[in-house]
Amino acid sequence: DKLNIVSSFCKRMVDNVGYPLQIKETTSIETGIEGAQIILVHIRVGGFLARIEYEKSPVNYDLIGDESFGAGSFLNAIYTLPVMLEIGRKIASVNPTAYVINMTNPMGLVVETLTRFAGLKNIIGISETATSYKRLFSQILNVSERNVSIQYIGLYHLGAVCDVCLRGKSIMVELIEKLEKEKVPNINNEFLSIFNIIPSRALNIFLSKSDYLKEQKKKTVFRSEILYEHEAKILNIYKDKNITTIPDVVYERNPSWYDEIIIPLICSLQKQRSEEHIICIPNKDYLAEFPFDTAVEIPCEINKKEIRPSIKTKLPEILRGLLLTAKESDRLMIEAIINKSYNYALKSLAMNPFVDSFTKAKLFLDEFIQKKKIEWLK
């Protein structure tokens, strides 16, 4: 039903502006991906109701709830990775040379799973973190975004901006001073001045886990619940055959993904001249600290012929231990899915940086398995 509603609206929108774009809809993955140069994958197993569970359920166990890291990401992986693995294997069979742009969370786990176990060679994961920071930095410096480049290193959401350049020259010291004066929300000024890196949202949360958990416990409405309501409103508006332009309610979700991230990336994959993007890709010795083919998020130069890493700084020592621990937790989670292993799942959850005890990890996992009757995780 949703497919028909959205595709009909898209056709009306295209007809309204007169652009010669053909839109087709199908429920067959094979039909949808055959012959494509670029495949966008953005699914949410269980819909927004599942995301609500990722955010709210962990909080009941005194754990931070989020779909991209911690116990919430763990739940997301249990639901999502088996489905993504099936999709990835179909892509590898039907159209193995296509570029796959993945928007499905948990991002790093998906990219790594599809690389190692589906055999995809050209998979790219994308995140809004670097783009939103680039916009913020440009505003603070009062310069055009095209003149600003950032060196972000991490594991999808968990990472940091390690350097910022204006027209090729590092301005990190100046920028940190400005950020401290601006008092930007969700950025710890003391952390900026001590470590000289700009933490991602997830890293900021890690640095203040207890405070963030207290705030989550006070919440009456979670973001996932707001998005769930928005989706229902949007689909209801799309049903109106007189609607031929994007309704205002869509922009309440702040959908910067498409015009600021996805479209520029697609364009870069078609151009001769290279352009820089921060993307999540399989590690090919780009970061020596991490295993081969594990997913890392780094700056890359992209054109129609190649994707070439453009790392101009080292992984900060302050991040190394944390990211290695998070990566090992990711690896064990993937192994738990592939091997249908309770032991791997428990190990993954227990050593996750956002889970503070083995006891909580075991209680959370055991009650989840019992509640959802997950027979395959033994």
Image (spheres, grey):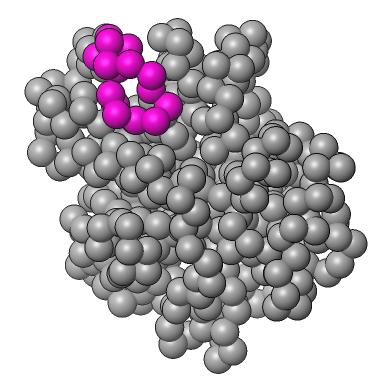
The image shows residue 44 at horizontal and vertical percentages of 43, 39
Task: Classify residue 350 as left or right of residue 278.
Answer: left
Pick the front one: 258 or 16: 258
Is residue 301 part of the magenta span, yes or no?
A: no
- Eyeballing the image, is 105 above or below 309? above
x 74%, y 58%: residue:
173
- Residue that extends furthest to the right in the rendered view of this protein: 142
x 13%, y 21%: residue:
375
The image shows residue 204 at horizontal and vertical percentages of 59, 35
- Eyeballing the image, is 173 above or below 18? above
x 65%, y 77%: residue:
20
The image shows residue 287 at horizontal and vertical percentages of 37, 63
For the C terminus, the quadrant is top left
- Residue that extends furthest to the front in the rendered view of this protein: 194
- Eyeballing the image, is 25 above or below 207? below
Task: Classify residue 39 as left or right of residue 144.
Answer: left
Residue 220 seen by the camera? yes
Residue 249 seen by the camera? no
Task: Classify residue 27 as left or right of residue 277.
Answer: left
The image shows residue 291 at horizontal and vertical percentages of 25, 58
Number of callouts:
0
- Eyeballing the image, is 336 above or below 164? above
- Residue that extends furthest to the bottom in the rendered view of this protein: 272
Range of residues picked out in magenta: 349-363
x 58%, y 25%: residue:
208
**Would you identify the image quadrant in which residue 99 lies?**
bottom left
**Would you identify the image quadrant in which residue 75 lies?**
top left
Is residue 353 part of the magenta span, yes or no?
A: yes
Pick the front one: 210 or 318: 318
